[in-house]
Amino acid sequence: MTYAVAFQDLSLGYDRLPAVQNLDSQITEGSLTAIVGPNGAGKSTLLKGVIGTLAPLGGRLSLGTLARDDIAYLPQQSDIDRSFPLSVVDLVALGLWREIGAFGSLSRASRQRVAEAISAVGLEGFETRPIGSLSGGQMQRALFARLLLQDARLVLLDEPFTAIDTKTMADLLAVVQRWHGEGRTVVAVLHDIDTVRAYFPETLLLARELVAHGPTAEVLTAENQFRARQMCEACAGPPHTCGRSAA
């Protein structure tokens, strides 16, 4: 199978302190994969390494046949400044920035695509609303609409279903399933294990180091989850000396 992303003895971190260590694994092209693990396991850090905002401290990260422009990334909502004066339609249209440039204007065809993306996530009638007035679920719908327009081969989602209502979650999971059905590679950092078991065929269990990666039912065993908690609890802060000896 062709890989979308490969990790070879990869270490990532901040100020030379590793948050992900010695990771060896691959994300298969076209797979639907959840990244799970305890708090502080390095899950969001790993996504930042994939998009290139964090350079490896050691090892290597390879993108297979992908270019950086083939990646769409949804950060956690807490990382987004909602005070910026944007309307919903302006935010969604940012998904076309590679086509129209920073200062380009939307053509009639582009405006139609924006409208279709807004409709696809159930936000008709919200086009002129400022993003600061949206609920958490409405904001997440708008961000998914932006991702739809990016038309990326690899979609990275960091806690996409946190603090949203059940209906919104179901609608956005349908979008994720649609991407998977189109052959795109989708990777999501998730906390809710029931959601992972129900919707994500592949799981990467991380505890700063790799615990397990493969079919979800084989990865999310009680033994593996207990081991992951032990490994993260062994990391008592800098210098992050937890390692294989802590497993």
Image: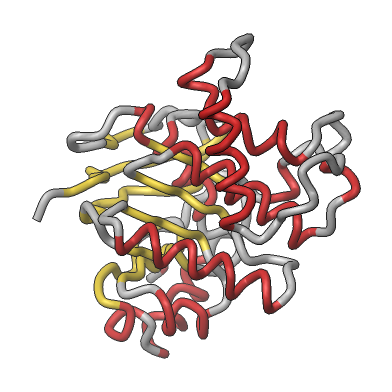
For residue 159, side relative to residue 61 (left or right): right
State which quarter of the image contains the C terminus.
bottom left
Q: Quadrant of residue 5?
A: top left
Q: In the depicted view, which residue is nearer to us: 242 or 3?
A: 3
How far across and how far down the image is residue 122, in percent? Answer: 66, 61
Q: How many marks?
A: 0
How far across and how far down the image is residue 90, in percent? Answer: 72, 31
Vertical position of residue 122 compared to residue 90: above or below? below
Residue at (27, 61) in percent of width and height:
31
For residue 184, side relative to residue 117 (left or right): left
Q: In the depicted view, which residue is nearer to us: 144 or 200?
A: 144
Residue at (64, 47) in percent of width and height:
143
Colour pattern of the rendering: secondary structure
For residue 162, side relative to residue 157 (left or right): right
How far across and how far down the image is residue 9, in percent? Answer: 25, 44
Residue at (38, 40) in percent of width and height:
152
How far across and how far down the image is residue 201, in percent? Answer: 31, 75
Q: In the depicted view, which residue is nearer to us: 215 or 39?
A: 215
State which quarter of the image contains the N terminus.
bottom left
Vertical position of residue 27 compared to residue 191: above or below? above
Q: Residue furthest front?
A: 108
Vertical position of residue 79 compared to residue 247: above or below? above
Residue at (43, 29) in percent of width and height:
52
Q: Quadrant of residue 216?
A: bottom left
Q: Residue furthest bottom?
A: 222
Task: Judge whether residue 25 can be spotted in this image.
Answer: no
Task: Judge whether residue 229 can be spotted in this image.
Answer: yes
Q: Residue furthest left?
A: 1
